[in-house]
Amino acid sequence: MAGFYSREYSYKQRLVSWLSQNANFTYTCRRGVARGLKRKGGLAFLPNFAQPTAEETFLRGLDLRDKIVFDVGGFMGLMTLLFASRGKRVFTFEPNPEARQRIQANLDANGFDCVTLRGVALGDRPGKVELVFDALMAGGASGDAKVSAELRATAAHPRTIEAEVTTLDREIEAGLPVPDLVKIDVEGMECAVLRGMRNLLATRKPWVYVELHGTDGADKQAKASGAINALREFGYRIYDVERGVYIAPDDPVTGKESHIFGD
């Protein structure tokens, strides 16, 4: 039976992912964060009669003019497309080569040349990591111990790859520019990514956007607390995107937080 984390990937998402792997036609998105941009695969050519999600509304409302964006966890590249269409320069970190191919195909469809793809995972120390993912959700790979274990147990077609890991601070030391926005969606590894960018948080304080994951309620709460406290340590305010409010410093972390923004 699918667990708490696995249920985050609905049958619709798996269908969209399958189409993304097998469909060769290019179309203009009519929904989601990449609305108005070209894409291969998926179902975004269908009209959307529902209201935009809180995440879509928030991200599309950010002023990214002249900004450098780090997209940590590229998945299929839809957020990379949004950032590329509005920002100055984008660096997308995606260790899974299958996912990187999809991102590149979507970039090529739009003629974007302002994006650099980095085929490494980010964490709190350099090394290697085994990433586990569902074959239908190649961009949803995780090296988090609990998430990986659940994927191995519940995915219909679990696969693994070994990836190089580095830190965001080391990437900047090696020559990447300082980002204005860091978006993190890494399937349970978000706290490790934040620990690996402590110097950046302390000295330059970019905007930070984080999607939170967990295998159950307790794990989700622990990861949300870890991410929020890591940002608060450096003086960040924390905005709960779904609730549309800043979280007061003395408010408890519930584990129901899905997307947070630190400024």
Image: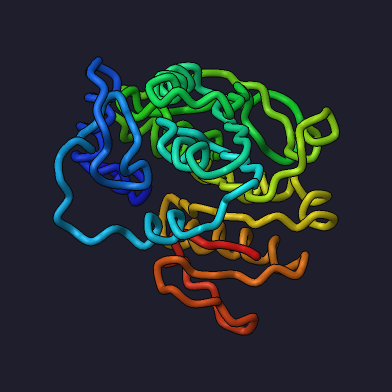
- Left or right of residue 11, residue 82 in this image: right
In terms of depth relative to the viewer, which is nearer, 206 or 29? 29
Quadrant of the rendered structure where residue 121 is?
Answer: top right
Examine the rendered structure and indicate whether residue 78 appears above or below residue 245.
above
Quadrant of the rendered structure where residue 9 is?
Answer: top left
Q: Position of residue 168 (x, y in %)?
A: 73, 39
Q: How is the image coloured?
A: rainbow
**Residue shown at the point (69%, 62%) measured from the top left:** 231
In terms of depth relative to the viewer, which is nearer, 63 or 237? 63
Examine the rendered structure and indicate whether residue 219 appears above or below residue 165.
below
Q: Where is residue 98 in the image (x, y as percent from the top left)?
A: 43, 17
**Residue shown at the point (64%, 46%) measured from the top left:** 66
Q: Where is residue 252 in the image (x, y as percent from the top left)?
A: 55, 79
In terms of depth relative to the viewer, which is nearer, 72 or 107? 107
**Residue shown at the point (55%, 77%) measured from the top left:** 247
Question: In the rendered image, which quarter contains the N terminus?
Answer: top left
Question: In the rendered image, which quarter contains the C terminus?
Answer: bottom right
Examine the rendered structure and indicate whether residue 196 appears above or below residue 91.
below
- Left or right of residue 35, residue 98 in this image: right
Examine the rendered structure and indicate whether residue 200 appears above or below residue 256.
above
- Left or right of residue 158, residue 146 in this image: right
Q: Number of numbered discs present? A: 0
Q: Position of residue 206 (x, y in %)?
A: 70, 55
**Residue shown at the point (27%, 37%) measured from the top left:** 29
